[in-house]
Image (cartoon, helix red, strand yellow):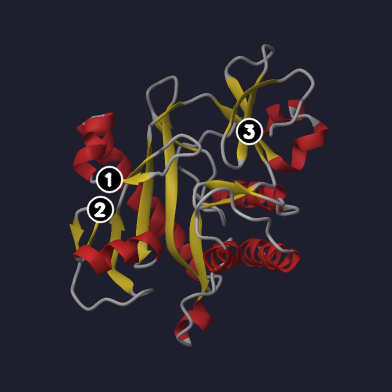
Amino acid sequence: MSEELDGWEHLYSGKVRDLYATDAHPDRVLMVASNRVSAFDHVLSPAIPGKGAMLTELSHWWFDQLDGMPNHLAPDSEWKIIPPAVADRAMLVKKLVMFPIECVVRGYLSGSGWAEYQESRSVCGIRLPAGLRDGDRLPEPIYTPAWKAPVGQHDENITLERSAELVGLTNATALRDLSLTIFTRASVIAESHGIILADTKFEFGSDIDGTITLGDEVLTSDSSRYWDAATYASGDRTASFDKQPVRDWLKANWDQTGEPPPLPADVVATTVERYRELLGRLTA
């Protein structure tokens, strides 16, 4: 699944990203975004052409917008060591000790949050007002962490109390506060481009000095749910700038048993266009 890169040792492959290390720079990691696409905890085929480069460009752009927030990017002067074959899909980053939770923030009720709300009128233990509909804006953003499951297993929504058991109360509280702050800041930026940031997930780690540091990807089409503000205002709450066409096709054509079927060409093409449009609108 991973690529061979001269001078770099493959460390790990997630659903989308591959990590590499080199003895020449022991305190750095090469993070390469592939064109793989995943849904319902399965890596699908075929891949989405150009996806890795678009995710990397968008992530790097967001890191620039979030100046003042410690992140894992190595200084630009070091990026010359990135192999040319993956230069458009790679980030050179500092080594972090990652926290084993995904820091999810929801500004709108959708996806798994909507499904949970229908059953319990709450999301990850947070009680919400009665009468909300799919896609409604929440009174205020909520923090709903998740336990990061290994590849092939389901991520698990957890409460803040459970996250404190995993990472300690001080860290759990800091991760919540940082996530809500970044989400609020990013939402304002997205809105200035006519885009709604409905929800997202952040991943953090601790650097060599113990500073909580924003890592992995940030605010990309894979980690976030974005809507067109004008389309949302018209009443359409289903069109998002991400892999929703993939999810929709799978729901209609796969019972989620066994291996998922190959994606048809038109679904792949539509998904590529969703990624490309979001990148263009935000970074223009």
Number of marks in the rendered image: 3
| Residue that sits furthest to the right in the current view | 84
Q: Residue at x 23, y 65 (%)?
A: 119
Label located before the other in sequence (1 or 2): 2
Tag 3, which secondary structure?
Answer: strand
The amino acid marked with disc number 3 is Asp
Using the image, determine if residue 121 lies above or below residue 224.
below
Percent x, y of residue 114 = 33, 66
- Alpha-carbon span between mark 1 and mark 2: 6 Å
**Callout 1 touching callout 2 (CB < 8 Å):** yes
Q: Nearer the viewer, residue 103 or 140?
A: 103
Near mark 2 (Cα within 10 A), the count class, few <14, some 14-19 or many ≥20, is: some
Q: Is residue 108 left or right of residue 276?
A: left
The amino acid marked with disc number 1 is Ile
The amino acid marked with disc number 2 is Cys
Residue designated by label 2: 124
Using the image, determine if residue 117 lies above or below residue 52.
below
| Residue that sits furthest to the bottom in the current view | 234
Residue designated by label 3: 18
Tag 2, which secondary structure?
Answer: loop
Percent x, y of residue 117 = 26, 65
Residue designated by label 1: 158
